[in-house]
């Protein structure tokens, strides 16, 4: 029997495994980087071991340090979570060679399936050996890892070499393996997967289907189980293919076989030899704990001949610290408060007051709703996210709510191109017009402009706020009866609650302040100074860092004095496991370059300056 488990991971998945271990009476051990010294998973475990450094390559990707930590703390098993070393066969062997229990598939199965090229060959599929115009569009894909890293869609043959180079560099940085391959890109397909679970006695479960079609940058955003609208014959084919893949490599433990479904046909994508981020929707539908079953299998236990019966429908939404309206730019800062209404499962690796840094994935939490029908689950999750308290950096919360309520999603007509088609409408600002007034009235609570009352009307007080990228003014007056504003009746105004009557309808506004940031219900505002900063100006053509991160590459041969074309890639930033390309805003001359590989920059840092060329001087 396993008595102590080290989780070779961080954040939400580490906390998830610790929770099950606690319920089973198993002692837990965490590993943490310097950036995670005060993280929730570090504090949640019974023991924690520091991995010096912050970058994944020197911490969570150091198999030797993690095995040593397990041995030094008396752990007798290692759970890899997902990401990092979870699909690394050498790490699995190192754990087993140290006499520890590996809560995962055999190293040989990981090896067979961890490379997407070998996995496809195992399933009788060969990648493209060469690419012609007739093959377009194609998908460049990293052979190792997942999470959308090292993936590029190529629609123009002239872009192929550059995208191959970019994919190799990103894959090497993320997984330590720069192998990439090219395959046909199927337009308008749905991403459907099958959860499998196998024991050491020959039993393999196929635990239904999941639809993960809502994706950004090839990374999943909304997942659900079962996949809606699949014909019974197709669902049965997917189950059979998943079981066949598991049996082909003598699989043990939890894994996922992924497919692209288009025109009623299933195309094999890959097998992930680990627990998936979206595993909670399967747990909700089947009423099981996949982590507990992983531990049972690792201990040599048996599964029942047949899996439990599926009941109802479950949907999961990933809450990210990112701005979808700005190319999904990741956001950093303090997460002051995160809470959802009762009845919603919230898996998170952050406690209130935690710092969201630049080193890791920007996912803050996963919210999961389960209900008897899909429509009820969608409504339940959308309503819960709308009422959730999310105080901190900009998130994709509003996008999630709108996505769940979009007719295409509600009618289960979505595919992997959903956000390509609808992102503009889903990110259209729709701020509450009364939020600035509520914030100003709460701020004015208890203040008075007068030493004594006068018989002349006071001039309105004005406060300015930045809301949804636009400046807004709020005007109010101090009167004998209290605070007043034009067009509304102020029923109540104090530090934490403002009540307004608008056209005869009472509206409550919960107020929370964190420095200059004010949250009015779900709306975030930034209080602006009375007078602007006259020095806050940049030269025309200045390229500023859109997020904090690290410069990973500069375009080959780029130097001050070079002529660049509009849209030409100049450099690449990496932040929160994502690469972001910085391109020339217009054709012109590069007059300054302050970026170099390895340099860490803060948001707003000056990276380069492109002096726009007169239109008739453009080559």
Image (cartoon, rainbow, N blue to C red):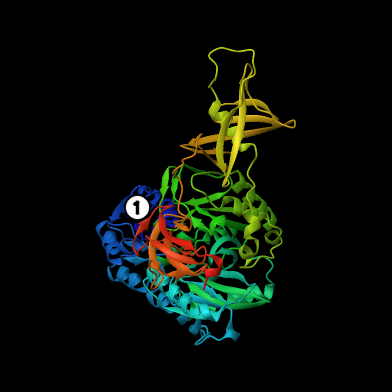
Q: Quadrant of residue 33?
A: bottom left
Q: Nearer the viewer, residue 487 or 589?
A: 589
Residue 463 locus on image (x, y percent): 56, 33
Is residue 569 found left or right of 172 in the rendered image? right
- Could you say which quadrant of the image residue 165 lies in? bottom left
The spot of residue 340 in percent (x, y) is 55, 45
Which residue bears the numbered disc 1? 35
Instruction: Look at 51% across and 38% down and name the residue there.
Output: 528
Report if residue 536 is visible in the image.
yes
Residue 329 x, y percent position in the rendering: 50, 57
Q: Out of 378 and 237, give the one closest to the viewer.
A: 378
Count how many numbered circles sit on residues in the image: 1
145 or 253: nearer the eye?
Answer: 145
Which one is in front, 290 or 421? Answer: 421
Above or below 569: residue 288: above
Q: Residue furthest right?
A: 504
Residue 461: percent from left, percent from top: 58, 27
Q: What residue is at 28 percent from the left and 68 percent from the top?
A: 99
- Say left or right for 600 vs 441: left
């Amino acid at each position: 029997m396993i008595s102590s488990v080290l989780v070779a991971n961080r954040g939400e998945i580490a906390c998830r495994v610790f929770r099950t271990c606690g319920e089973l009476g198993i002692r837990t051990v965490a590993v943490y980087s310097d950036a995670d010294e005060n993280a929730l998973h570090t504090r949640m475990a019974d023991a924690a071991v520091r991995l010096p450094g912050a970058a994944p390559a020197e911490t969570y990707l150091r198999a030797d340090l993690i095995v040593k930590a397990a041995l030094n703390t008396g752990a007798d098993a290692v759970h890899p979570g997902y990401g990092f070393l979870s699909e690394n066969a050498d790490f699995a062997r190192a754990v087993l060679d140290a006499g520890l229990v590996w809560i995962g598939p055999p190293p040989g199965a990981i090896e067979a399936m961890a490379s997407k090229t070998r996995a496809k060959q195992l399933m009788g599929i060969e990648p493209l050996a060469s690419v012609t115009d007739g093959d377009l569009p194609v998908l460049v894909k990293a052979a190792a890892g997942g999470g959308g890293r090292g993936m590029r869609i190529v629609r123009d043959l002239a872009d192929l070499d550059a995208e191959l180079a970019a994919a190799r560099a990103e894959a090497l940085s993320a997984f330590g393996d720069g192998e990439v391959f090219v395959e046909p890109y199927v337009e308008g397909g749905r991403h459907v997967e099958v959860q499998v679970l196998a024991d050491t006695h020959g039993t393999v479960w196929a635990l239904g289907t999941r639809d993960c079609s809502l994706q950004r940058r090839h990374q999943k955003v909304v997942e659900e189980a079962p996949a809606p609208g699949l014909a019974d014959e197709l669902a049965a084919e997917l189950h059979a293919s998943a079981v066949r893949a598991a049996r082909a490599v003598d699989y043990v433990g939890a894994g996922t076989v992924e497919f692209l479904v288009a025109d009623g046909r299933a195309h094999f994508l890959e097998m992930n030899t680990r627990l998936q981020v979206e595993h909670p929707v399967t747990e909700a539908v089947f009423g099981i704990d996949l982590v507990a079953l992983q531990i049972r299998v690792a201990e040599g236990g048996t599964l029942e001949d047949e899996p439990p019966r599926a009941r109802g429908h479950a949907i999961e939404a990933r809450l990210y610290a990112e701005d979808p309206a700005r190319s999904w730019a990741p956001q950093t800062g303090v997460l002051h408060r995160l809470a959802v209404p009762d009845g919603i499962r919230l898996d998170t690796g952050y406690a209130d007051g935690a710092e969201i840094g630049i080193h890791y994935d920007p996912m803050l939490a996963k919210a999961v709703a389960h209900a008897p029908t899909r429509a009820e689950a969608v409504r339940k999750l959308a309503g819960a996210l709308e009422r959730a308290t999310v105080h901190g950096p900009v998130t994709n919360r509003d996008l999630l709510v709108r996505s769940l309520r979009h007719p295409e999603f509600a009618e289960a007509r979505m595919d992997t191109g959903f956000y390509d088609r609808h992102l503009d409408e889903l990110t259209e600002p729709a701020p509450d017009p009364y939020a600035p007034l509520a914030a100003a009235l709460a701020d004015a609570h208890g203040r008075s402009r007068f030493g004594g009352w006068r018989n002349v009307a006071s001039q309105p007080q004005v406060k300015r706020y930045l809301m949804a990228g636009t400046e807004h003014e709020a005007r109010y007056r101090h009167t004998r009866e209290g605070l007043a504003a034009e067009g509304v009746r102020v029923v109540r105004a104090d530090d934490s609650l403002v009540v307004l009557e608008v056209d005869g309808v009472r509206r409550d506004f919960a107020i929370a302040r964190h420095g200059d940031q004010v949250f009015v219900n779900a709306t975030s505002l930034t209080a602006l100074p009375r007078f602007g900063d006259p020095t806050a100006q940049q030269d025309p053509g200045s390229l500023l860092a859109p997020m904090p991160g690290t410069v990973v590459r500069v375009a080959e041969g780029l130097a001050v004095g070079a002529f660049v074309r509009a849209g030409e890639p100049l450099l690449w930033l990496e932040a929160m496991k994502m690469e972001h390309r910085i391109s020339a805003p217009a054709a012109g001359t590069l007059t300054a370059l302050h970026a170099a590989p390895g340099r860490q920059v803060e948001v707003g840092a000056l990276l380069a300056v492109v002096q726009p060329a007169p239109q008739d001087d453009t080559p």
